[in-house]
Amino acid sequence: MKKQIKKTRKTTPKNVRDISTESMPLDIEVKNSISTPKRDPRIPPVGTVLTKTYHGQTLEVKVLENSFEYQGKVYKSISRVAMEIVHHPISGYVFFGLDK
């Protein structure tokens, strides 16, 4: 005995619309869903030079728009700069006294 397989035609339900062919109204306002992250209020203004005396050396770190410059290299975070200086994980905000 063979099983009979009923072939059905694929149809779209009546309550589903294909909007790819419909025109969009012209009065829709498109908003940019990508926003820039807010700047941490603990970080000083752009152009500020942070100074810190560590093991008898005076260190200078320049605050850039979205990064920090130390000894000619650019770092994404102040903590990364602090880790480069002390050679172990440390909070850059605490190290440079910005946590207040």
Image: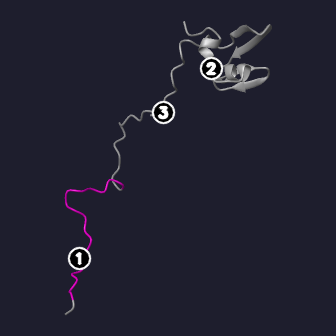
Q: State the CA–CA distance, disc 2 to disc 3.
A: 31 Å
Up the image or down, 3 lies above or below 51; here it is below
Q: What secondary structure is marked by label 2?
A: loop
- Magenta-highlighted residues: 3-20
> Which comes sooner in the sequence, label 2 or label 1?
1
Judged by its main secondary structure, the magenta piece is: loop
Q: State the CA–CA distance, disc 2 to disc 1.
A: 66 Å
Residue 86 numbered mark, or none = none
In the rendered structure, the answer to whether residue 28 lies left or right of residue 61 reads left
In this rendering, which labeled residue sits more in front, label 2 or label 1?
Answer: 2
Q: Which residue is mark 3?
A: 34
Say few, some or many: other residues with alpha carbon within 10 Å of mark 1 (under 14 / 14 to 19 / 20 or more). Answer: few
Three-letter amino acid code at the position of disc 3? Ile
> Which comes sooner in the sequence, label 1 or label 3?
1
Residue 90 numbered mark, or none = 2
Residue name at image x 72 percent, y 8 percent:
52
Q: Quadrant of residue 92?
A: top right
Q: Which residue is mark 1?
A: 8
Foreground pick, 11 / 53 = 53
Q: State the CA–CA distance, disc 1 to disc 3.
A: 45 Å
Three-letter amino acid code at the position of disc 2? Ile
- Residue 45 percent coordinates (x, y): 62, 11
- Residue 96 percent coordinates (x, y): 65, 11
